[in-house]
Structures are given as structure tokens and as C-alpha cells.
Image (spheres, rainbow, N blue to C red):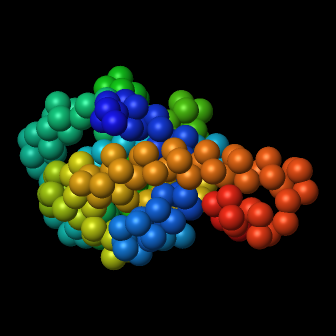
């Protein structure tokens, strides 16, 4: 079977949904903790994303970052972001900072990036929504992160969000049902298994419409 391209992987997983992916990782790979938890939600239910993680970690620190250092960090982000990547930010649970705004979303869109995942505050949520950027975050916050509130500690290193490890290149998939992490080593297998599972579920829906009972549905591979 031919391996899918990055675009095919992202589009295919984006058409899936978290419950199907967690079922596959539970049963096929014995990975039982790949959901980022109930706090991280899309700005609106229609938002979806899928792609390899571009990881960042910020720490709570009352040190103002020098302009030159902040500019260097921003330039690195812009230069390293590529189409289909999903920026993912561990904020160290900071409660008084916004880590992503409308202008950053505009830059991302110019680089072929469609969404981001923030374990914390996000600025400009209305304008992000109007721009059509798929933003997943915990709460809106107008406060800039880097002014005496928080500083960036690492870029493109493993991070931990709600006890889920996310490494650079691990795949993220999110919709209104939550955000899940697919380890990069198994993402192709999960992609194909998700396609098969969704096909089975379409057949199960047809059985339901035809009046099938529970035994018939389970025999056909359906999930309740």
C-alpha cells in the first residue's frame, strides 16, 4: 500500500474525528492517554485541524524579554513554519497571558498553516474567528504574554500538556470533540485504520436506517 503524502495525511485525518482516532489508539496500539483534555476547545464548533506539531514551551517568569531576543524568536518561528504544521504551545498553565493573536494567525496563513493549539490564553479571538483560522485554546485573554508575564523556554522540543507528551512532528487532530495526539511513528497506520473505521461506520448507519438490531450492527463492525 502506497504511503500517503503529508497533504493526504493531513486532509484524511482532518476528515476523521477524535473519538475514532482514540478508539484506534486504544485498541490497536494500547495508547490510552492521547486526548489533551476538556479545557482545550475550538473558538467555534466548526473549526477543525490536523497536522504535525510545531512545539513551543513558555514558562511563567516576571522577566521582560529584550526586544532583540524576542525578535530572534519571532524570526525563527516565521522561518521554520511550513504548510500543514500545527503550532502547539505549552503555557505552563499561565492564567494572565495571551500567547497567539490575529497577526500571528495571518502570518501562519501565509505559510500554509491553518490552525494552532494553545494550552492557555489567546488574544483577538473574534478577529481570529473572522479570519477563518482554526484556533484551539482554553480562554480568551487580551494581555500580551511577553510583557513581565511569561517567556519562551524552548522551541521544537518535547512538551507536556495535561500529561500527554507531544514531540515535534507528532500529529495533532482536533475538532469540537477535542484535540488528540497521534505519535508520528504510527500516524500512517492510524490514517489507514481511520479510513476503514469510517467506512464501517457509514455501513452501520445504513444498517440502522434499514432497521437492523444491535447484534447485526456489532457483527458488521459498528460502534455504539
For the point 37% across and 73% down, which residue is it? 30
Image location (x, y in percent) of residue 7: 37, 30
As drawn, the residue found furthest toward the top would be 110
Position of the C terminus by quadrant: bottom right
Left of 145 or right of it: where is 49?
A: right
Image location (x, y in percent) of residue 91: 31, 64
Closest to the observer, 132 or 31: 31
Closest to the observer, 202 or 51: 202
Image location (x, y in percent) of residue 146: 26, 54
Relative to 47, is 197 above or below? Answer: below
Position of the N terminus by quadrant: top left
Relative to 14, is 28 above or below? Answer: below
For the point 41% across and 66% down, which residue is it? 28
Relative to 119, is 111 above or below? Answer: above
Left of 17 or right of it: where is 99?
A: left
Residue 20 sits in which quadrant?
Answer: bottom right
Please count the marks in the image: 0
Residue 99 appears in the rendering: no
For the point 46% across and 51% down, which residue is it? 193
Left of 182 or right of it: where is 142?
A: right
For the point 30% across and 55% down, which residue is it? 186
Residue 183 sits in which quadrant?
Answer: bottom left
Closest to the observer, 219 or 121: 219
Amino acid at each position: 500500500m502506497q504511503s500517503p503524502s503529508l497533504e493526504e495525511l493531513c486532509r484524511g485525518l482532518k476528515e476523521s474525528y477524535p473519538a475514532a482516532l482514540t478508539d484506534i489508539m486504544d485498541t490497536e496500539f494500547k495508547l490510552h492517554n492521547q486526548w489533551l483534555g476538556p479545557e482545550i476547545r475550538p473558538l467555534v464548533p466548526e473549526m477543525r485541524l490536523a497536522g504535525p506539531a510545531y512545539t513551543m514551551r513558555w514558562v511563567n517568569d516576571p522577566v521582560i524579554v529584550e526586544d532583540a531576543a524576542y525578535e530572534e524568536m519571532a524570526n525563527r518561528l516565521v522561518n521554520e513554519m511550513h504548510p500543514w504544521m500545527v503550532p502547539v504551545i505549552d503555557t505552563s498553565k499561565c492564567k494572565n497571558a495571551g500567547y497567539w493573536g490575529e497577526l500571528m494567525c495571518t502570518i501562519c496563513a501565509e505559510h500554509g498553516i491553518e490552525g494552532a493549539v494553545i494550552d492557555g490564553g489567546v488574544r483577538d479571538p473574534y478577529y481570529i474567528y473572522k479570519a477563518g483560522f482554526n484556533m484551539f485554546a482554553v480562554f480568551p485573554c487580551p494581555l500580551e504574554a511577553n510583557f513581565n508575564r511569561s517567556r519562551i523556554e524552548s522551541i521544537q522540543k518535547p512538551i507536556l500538556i495535561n500529561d500527554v507528551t507531544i514531540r515535534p512532528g507528532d500529529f495533532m487532530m482536533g475538532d469540537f470533540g477535542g484535540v488528540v495526539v497521534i505519535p508520528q511513528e504510527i500516524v500512517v497506520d492510524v490514517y489507514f485504520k481511520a479510513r476503514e473505521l469510517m467506512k464501517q461506520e457509514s455501513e452501520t448507519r445504513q444498517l440502522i436506517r434499514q432497521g437492523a438490531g444491535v447484534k447485526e450492527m456489532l457483527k458488521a463492525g459498528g460502534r455504539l
